[in-house]
Amino acid sequence: MIREFAVNLLKPIPCLPCAILHKSGNPLWLVKETVTAEGISCLRQNGVESVFFVSADESLADVRHRFCHDIIPVDQLHPGETLASPILDADGKLLFEANRPIPESLPRALTRRDVKTVMVRKTEEVLEEKKAETLRKSLEEIAQKVDSAASSGLLRALKEEDLPENTVEAVRKKSRKTLMTALETEGQAFMDFLDTPTDKTLPVTEEVKEFCHDMIAQSLEHIQYLFDQVQRNRRIIEVNLAEKTIQNIMSGLIRNRDLLMFTSTDHGQYEYLVSHALATAVIASNISINLGFDAKQVRVIVYGGMLADIGMLRVPESIRNKKEPLTSAEYAEIRRHPGYGMDMLEHVANLPEEVKYIVYQTHERVDGSGYPHGKKGVVIHPYAQIVSIADMYSSIITPRPFRDAESPYKGMEKLVLMCGKRQINAEYIRGFLKCNSMFPVGSFLQLSDGRVARVVAPSESDYMRPIVSVLSDAQGSPVEEYERLMLDQHSEVHIISSLERSQLPFNADMAIGF
């Protein structure tokens, strides 16, 4: 649902349940952001009379597309008339180029094809897109000033509690915002918190489930908007939004790494490149934590994982989403996307240098079989090798136009086989197995005693025997309370097979078992 709202009636909102858009379709505030009195005043000062509230079930990309185009009946296309924008069909495909007289044959041809309406992009004078982008930056700056004022008080509170000496207990008592303040100012606090043993036999609280769900939803919207901006401007201009997404992921790692890992890989409703970017960043962060990287290094790897395939935005969609096998020329275009990504990052301020290595080398392989240059072994940056594993796993378990998705177990199996062929680093695969196991978090399993279970966490001692939540009795009937089993401590119970959701003898929601 989309609702227009007068700015002079707008009030401060501490946590937005939906996005607020400019008339151009560009976001002014995204989900979970704060509408401040200062921000509302900024809109008024810039002559914005109304904004649009967009419900969470609407795709921002689709809404922006609708806002940016006029729908014109075919019978209103007048031969000889010249339009400043190209004429598109309902799917956004080009029908006729801009700045050329409309031929008499065009309306007739469209009528024969039973096309009743076409789309024409609105002009900049009407949309005021540049004004919207400037407003968005101003609103972000206002939000940062408010956050900075709040954080200074929180930081004083942390110092009073002597955080470095009492890290875990101090951090556990804090709100999400305080947790992030601690993370940004004291990297060791973050690592100490993650290293603290937790009881994985206990179910995840509803608060943590809700937090992970909301964090993933917000991050996906951020990445969608970031990528839309890149496609329009051919470069990254929303650096602050990228930083917010990284901060979200780091916060999610503190709450529950296992649940975060699973929820980040189950979002097919978004465009592939968007959901893949988030999944790659989350998976790579988990691998790097298990390899002992510090908080600063993890942040860089998250950044690189999120942008690893950004160059694909310059590859024509007709190639990216082609169902048939690629021609040699089309595959050559795919192989150019790391270079495209480097071009996009060239003028991004304050970008960690390692991110460029990640973007350029993620598709290289240790044995030299990758691209763009067939680099081998130690010549490939360690961060790129880690992101490479995350990138491949996310790709394997996600459906694509040209193939079906593989199961998470098959995804892990393929990576282990690649490791055996010395295509990827064995140490980094072990790091992945530590956080995902051979039966990845979220997988459904058939146990030897007839019960159905779900993997909720990896085992620290055995990649093949994870921690599971038992979902059914031996007859396949769902149970009311889930028993948690550490399979490495129950030698009498074995895994018979991995199950698809469609094979379950009962209905299962996304968070069942957690």
Image: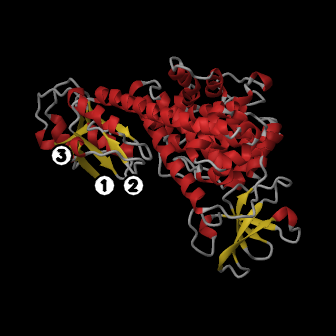
Residue type, label 2: Asp
Q: Earlier in the sequence, mark 1 or mark 2?
A: 1
Q: Earlier in the sequence, mark 3 or mark 1?
A: 1
Residue 57: mark: 2
Where is residue 354? Give x, y as percent.
Answer: 66, 23
The residue carrying pointer 3 sits among few (fewer than 14), some (14 to 19) or many (20 or more) residues within 10 Å by Cα, namely few
In the displayed structure image, the side of residue 425 where residue 163 appears, left or right = left
**Mark 2 residue element:** loop
Image height of 107 relative to 513, above or below: above
Residue 1: mark: 1
**Mark 3 residue element:** helix
Image height of 488 relative to 167, above or below: below
Residue, disc 3:
111
**Mark 1 residue element:** loop
Residue type, label 1: Met
Q: Nearer the viewer, residue 430 or 416?
A: 430
Where is residue 514? Give x, y as percent.
Answer: 65, 63
In the displayed structure image, the side of residue 298 where residue 83 appears, left or right = left
Q: Quadrant of residue 325?
A: top right
In the displayed structure image, the side of residue 90 where residue 405 appears, left or right = right
The single residue placed furthest to the right in the displayed view is 491
